[in-house]
Image (cartoon, helix red, strand yellow):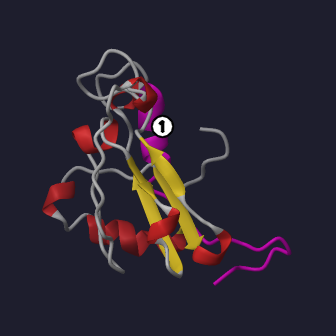
Amino acid sequence: MGSFKGFPEFGRRVQERLTREPVLAGYQTIEQCSLEYRANEGSCISPHIDDCLAPSAQEPLLWHQLSRPPTVRLPMPARSLLVMQAEARYEWLHGILRSDISGRRVCLALREFTPAFMPGGEEEQLGAEVTAQAQCFFTPQTAGGEVSA
């Protein structure tokens, strides 16, 4: 658990909105990353495959061990939603290339647990603790103690 105390309040609206999407039925956010990309800073995320166990795998999938990793490039217009699961998350390369960033780009990446932390997985108990804490939202404070907007 470390210092995980839930999510910043600004993420509540997004997470509540996601619960209305049929493809995300049963989805539980346990990680929220706010990412900003700027063309003038050379921002990117190198193409990668999430290096955790896929539901059907016995060993972690590592893209550099594949003979020819599949790559799919999708345009992501402003305010779009991309849901990655199964092969797309664990077997396909995904990233954001420098050449695809022409200005400022903001991304809110939300993730759920991998199977090891879900019911029936070897880390089920820790998964339950984190899931319970993930129901909490807090108002961030600045370094000086003021509440941020």
- The residue sitting at the left extreme is 22
- Residue 136 position in % (x across, y down): 49, 58
Residue 128 highlighted magenta (yes or no)? yes
Residue at 43% x, 27% y is: 62
Which amino acid lies under the numbered mark 1 shown in the image of this protein? Glu
Residue marked by disc 1: 129
Please count the marks in the image: 1
Q: Is residue 148 left or right of 26 when viewed as pictured?
A: right
- Residue 23 quadrant: bottom left
- Residue 34 position in % (x across, y down): 54, 65
- The residue sitting at the right extreme is 144
Query: In this rendering, is residue 47 above or below 101?
Result: above
Query: In this rendering, is residue 28 above or below 8?
Result: above
Please report the bounds of the magenta region as a residue range. 125-149
Q: How would you rate the neighbour count of disc 1 (Cα within 10 Å): few for under 14, some for 14-19, many for 20 or more?
A: few
Residue at 43% x, 54% y is: 95
- Residue 116 position in % (x across, y down): 37, 26
Residue 129 highlighted magenta (yes or no)? yes
Q: In the rendered view of the protein, which quadrant contains the C terminus?
A: bottom right
Q: Which of 135 and 52 lies nearest the eye of the viewer?
A: 52
Residue at 23% x, 39% y is: 86
- Residue 115 quadrant: top left
Whether residue 68 appears in this view of the structure is yes
Residue at 47% x, 60% y is: 97
Whether residue 7 appears in this view of the structure is no
Secondary structure at numbered mark 1: helix
Q: Which of 58 and 147 lies nearest the eye of the viewer?
A: 58
Q: In the rendered view of the protein, which quadrant contains the N terminus?
A: top right
